[in-house]
Image: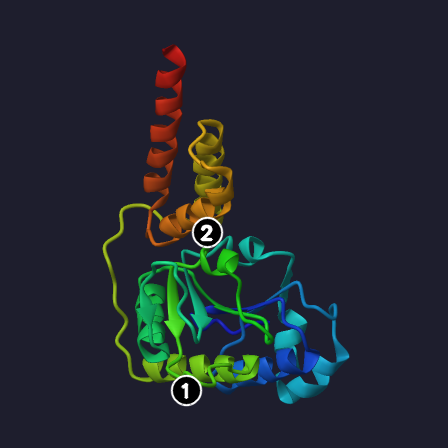
Amino acid sequence: MPTDTKQPAFVLIRPQMGENIGAAARAMWNFGLDRMRIVAPRDGWPNQKAVAMASGAGRLLDEATLCDSTPDAIGDCDYVYATTARPRELTKPVFTPEAGMADARDRIAAGQRVAVLFGPERAGMENDDIARANAIISVPVNHRFASLNLAQCVLLTGYEWQKATAASVPMRTQLQGDWATQIEMEKLAENYESTLDRAGFFFPDHKAANMKVNLRNLWSRMTLTRADVQMLHGIMRQMVRWKDKD
């Protein structure tokens, strides 16, 4: 069974090698982290090479949540960080690992559910994955050799989590209602995207895909309550009704 320690979920997106998944499990357990989620591993699951590499952290692999997609993996979360050595053109808050894990500590203490995304070993995360995150954790590495091994990135982030929580004082924030989960944000984004699509907003066609990614990125930068989400659904619903009356 997972420990009862409040902590972020670490999400491995499309990992390519079982050995790296096992090494990531060891790195997590070094710092008391045991909420692993795995999205579409290339070589299938379970993976004996991951088990062999995990050594004493095999329990994390047994209890890991296997997911088909990034939205599935983060649907129950309130705030998500994407780790990358190269901040992309998407506009988001950018943290160092130290500042990011301090921020995660404070959010978890305030009752939010948090996840950290780690991309595939070969090329890192795609923009579609990063667009679903609320913030970026960027590792300040040598710009001439910015590639980090998956387990190295997990180890670095886990270390900063341990450091941030070792002597921290829990913080509380006043909240009216509940935070919106990622799946609620996903449904909100889908509603606006499909409605705007019908209205001809995504024009011209060759720019539509990038416009949709930017719109998705806009939603992910917002920290909304469930009441906020319901209001935004209601705004769009009323605008459509008003237009239909014309």
| Residue 207 drawn at (x, y percent) | 47, 44
Q: Return the residue at label 1.
A: 142
Looking at the image, what colour scheme do you see? rainbow
Q: Return the residue at label 2.
A: 182
Residue shown at 74% from the left, 68% from the top: 44
In which quadrant of the rendered image does the N terminus lie? bottom right
Quarter of the figure with residue 162: bottom left
| Residue 204 drawn at (x, y percent) | 46, 37
| Residue 246 drawn at (x, y percent) | 36, 11
As helix, strand or loop, the secondary structure at mark 2 comes to: helix
Identity, as a three-letter code, of the amino acid under mark 1? Asn
158 relative to 135 in the view: left or right: right
Residue most extreme to the top? 246
194 relative to 62 in the view: left or right: left
Does the residue at mark 2 contact the one at mark 1 (Cβ under 8 Å)? no
| Residue 15 drawn at (x, y percent) | 63, 71
> Which residue is nearer to you in this view: 140 or 226?
140
Check disc 2: other Cα within 10 Å, few if <14, some if 14-19, many if 20+. many
The residues tagged by marks 2 and 1 sit, at their Cα atoms, a distance apart of 33 Å
50 vs 118: above or below: below
Q: Is residue 179 visible?
A: no
Q: Is residue 40 visible?
A: yes
